[in-house]
Image: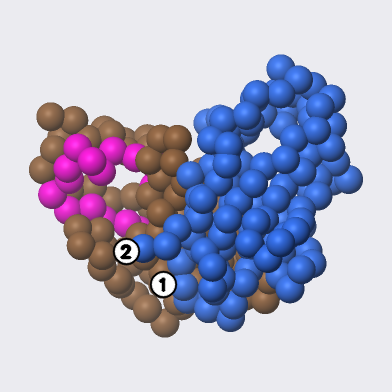
Amino acid sequence: EPEVTQTPSHQVTQMGQEVILRCVPISNHLYFYWYRQILGQKVEFLVSFYNNEISEKSEIFDDQFSVERPDGSNFTLKIRSTKLEDSAMYFCASIKQGASGSPLHFGNGTRLTVT
Amino acid sequence: KNQVEQSPQSLIILEGKNCTLQCNYTVSPFSNLRWYKQDTGRGPVSLTIMTFSENTKSNGRYTATLDADTKQSSLHITASQLSDSASYICVGFTGGGNKLTFGTGTQLKVEL
């Protein structure tokens, strides 16, 4: 069964550094998402992406965050200048277009640790 | 503001026993209600998806119910197994934007 893959599984970075988290969504899916989960807390929506543009973003997704689909395959989340509070699990997810009754498929996440 | 609340926060049961997890949701515009299972360190995996017209849906030993009038849902796990130990997350799905609102989850531990 096709799956969403994320790399790296764990990223350690120093405060103020830029990080790029990578995701390969399921190939025939057209809606893409980034979520984050701070340790012990609930999953939080960051951004949704469709047709090569952001369709919705949360208040968490400020100017330090950006998303890109550079090559029609990868879907990336960039944090320009990381802060300690950015430490979390970041999950990528994808779903078929117009299939609101279909499950969202999540990757296994990237654990980001900012020191 | 869309919200999903779950109870209990955590639960310990013996292997073979049944349990029921609860979810109250306020999601607008409501499209469907989902239950996900999240193993430690992994991404959530979909268990069930229910629209407002569906009262109950089963997936193996998992049975979800939905009361659209009271905006409540439950997930019943039958004959629990050690591998059922995980966080179970109730999620509201809004139409138009395909946005999910997550609950905080119920941490289930199944013991021998």
Q: Position of residue B30 (x, y in %)?
A: 57, 73
Q: Quadrant of the N terminus of chain B?
A: bottom right
Going by the numbered disc 1, the residue's amino acid type is Met
Task: Examine the rendering and report whether any part of residue B46 can be seen.
Answer: yes
The quadrant holding residue B72 is bottom left
Q: Given the current orientation, which residue lies at the most extreme front position?
A: A71
Q: Which chain is represented by brown in the image?
A: B
Q: Residue at x 71, y 70 (%)?
A: A50
Q: Given the current orientation, which residue lies at the most extreme right position?
A: A63
* Earlier sequence position, callout 2 versus callout 1: 1
Q: Which residue is mark 2?
A: B64
Q: Quadrant of the C terminus of chain B?
A: top left
Q: Helix, strand, or loop for circle 2?
A: strand
Q: Residue at x 72, y 32 (%)?
A: A86
Labels in figure, total: 2
The circle drawn on residue B50 is 1
Task: Examine the rendering and report whether any part of residue B2 can be seen.
Answer: no
Q: Which chain is represented by blue in the image?
A: A
Q: Is residue A103 above or below residue A5?
A: below
Q: Is residue B101 above or below residue A22?
A: below
Q: Residue at x 84, y 37 (%)?
A: A80
Q: The disc numbered 1 marks a residue on which chain?
A: B
Q: Give whichever of B97, B101 is nearer the camera.
A: B97
Q: Give whichever of B26, B49 is nearer the camera.
A: B49
Going by the numbered disc 2, the residue's amino acid type is Ala
Q: The disc numbered 2 marks a residue on which chain?
A: B
**Magenta span of residues:** B74-88
Label pair 2/1, CB-CB below 8 angstroms: yes
The circle drawn on residue B28 is none
The quadrant holding residue A95 is bottom right
Check residue A1 for magenta coloring: no
